[in-house]
Each structure stands twice: as structure tokens, then as C-alpha cells.
Image (cartoon, helix red, strand yellow):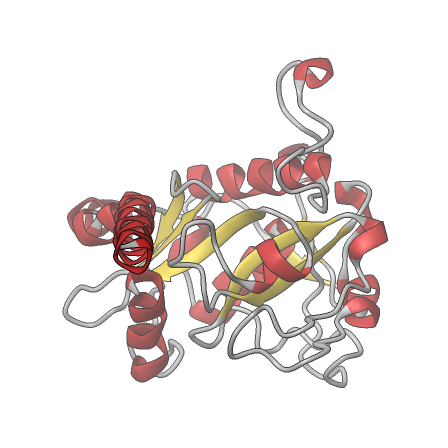
Amino acid sequence: NNNVSSLREAKASSTNLVRASSMRVARFLTFAASITGSIAKTANKTNTSAFVVSADGSVSRQQQTLIHTSISGNETNMPTFDEKYPGTAVARMYAVRARVAELANTGDLNGNWEDVRRKILWAGGLKDLPHARPGQGYTGHSFNDYNHVDLTTMADDVNDNENDGQVQGIAIGNRLGDGIRIASLPELGPGGSWSTCAMGCHHDPPQDVAHIQFRSRIAFKLVWVPNENFDTFVLVDDDGKLLAQGKPSDGPAGLPNLRERQLNYRIMKG
């Protein structure tokens, strides 16, 4: 009888977990499924700002008045610590989202994919370092495959955290600390940024690198929309709230491989 009772409890718990996971994932997949039409209407917006890539890989605007690196609104009311995910660099996370909002308002996410990707890096507080060595700040893979699409803002004291095996599909260790310190733009505040692996994000709570290895929320996640060509993307926050959307002008030929874009959506869906 005890065994039967335990089995029933385990089955009920599993059912509830799957149901909760489905609800969480559905929040940002709903955007991906319904947003294609609205993106088509905005895809032809004229870009109103110019970006300059410096020698060290950082990206900046020519029009300095358009740069917003601090948290908008009354900063004294902004939370500075996340009790559930204490590895989050909270102020940096909000500063990243402020930059994303800027890109969303100017049409900067509808240009050539490589230019768009550099701007996403800039918004996330990362340098564009396509020629650096892997592990030493290389960001050429960031947002260019199915998996490295979670922009994580982690506190300085967790930069060197390693994967002890809890994150399935990720190498044991997964030492990212040096790369985080090299590639992170300092002007967004304390902590660092990295494009961490999204695998495991479909669980609730998420079982991905950001939430498990770094105990951090994500500032945003890039999801490719499942339209006919998978040529449109959305950026959503840790709760699935839509932050921005884009349709690169050189798609689908200039985008990451179609299989990568399809797999990206698939791992979100679970």
C-alpha cells in the first residue's frame, strides 16, 4: 500500500511539474507563434542610429545622446538583490533591458544579421570578439547557433562557478570566468555578461546554465519564430515577457543555419 501511495504521489508531482513547465514556456512561445504578422509591418523601419565597432570589439553609438546605460525611472526603487537567484547582477540586468528597449524603439533589429547580432551583443553588455580564442572572450558563437542564446548577467562572485553535472548536456566544469571578464562591457555596472546555453530552459524551474551553474536569471533570451522560414526572432525576459522583435534584412540566407534556428525553437518548446 505504501508503495502504491508513493507511486501515486510521484506521478501527481510529475504531472504538476510538466503542467507548470508548459505554462511557463507557453508564455514566450505564444509570442513566437503570433508575432510574425506584426513584425512584417515594422521590418521596413529606417534605422535611426549608427553603431561603431572599436578595435577592442566594443560597440557604441555615434549619437551619444541615444545611449542609456543606467536603469530608467527611479533607481532607488529598483531591487538590488534577487533572493531566488542570488547570482544575478540585478542592476546590470536592468541596464541590459534598457538597451534592448532602445533597440526595439529604433528599428535596429531589422538590418543585416551580423550588424543585428553585434547590436544584441552591445545591448547585452558583451564585446564583439569573433577572433578571440574560445575561453578567452570569444563571442563569435553568441546568438549564432541554437543554444548560446541566453544573455546572462551574473554577479562577480559567481563568474568562476562550474557545472558539477547538474546541467544536463553541458560539459563538466564549463569554466567561463575568464571569458566573461574579458568580453564584458564595464559601463553596464557590476558583474559580467555571457551568452550561456539555453538547453534545459523548458523545465520549470529552468535547468539551464544561467539558473543552475550561475544561480542567475537571464536578462533576455533569443527565440527564432516558427514561421515558414524561421527568419524572425523575439527577445524575451526571464518570465517570457516580450522585450523586442526583429526580422533581419538579409534573411534567410544571411542568418544562422536553418537547422540551428529550428532547433532553437524546439529546445524552448521541449
Describe residue 47's horizontal placement relative to residue 82 as left or right.
left
Report which quarter residue 95 is drawn in: top right
Percent coordinates x, y for residue 257 in the rendering: 36, 83
- The residue that appears at 46% across and 51% down in the rendered structure is 108
Tell me if I can see residue 69 in this picture. Answer: no
Percent coordinates x, y for residue 55 in the rendering: 80, 70
Percent coordinates x, y for residue 111 in the rendering: 41, 61
Depth order, front residue of 260/249: 260
Report which quarter residue 258 is drawn in: bottom left
- The residue that appears at 31% across and 83% down in the rendered structure is 259
Placement of the C terminus among the 4 image quadrants: bottom left
In the image, farthest residue toward the front: 1
- The residue that appears at 67% across and 33% down in the rendered structure is 83
Tell me if I can see residue 64 in this picture. Answer: yes
Percent coordinates x, y for residue 209 in the rendering: 59, 64
Depth order, front residue of 172/117: 172
- The residue that appears at 25% across and 48% down in the rendered structure is 19
Depth order, front residue of 192/229: 192
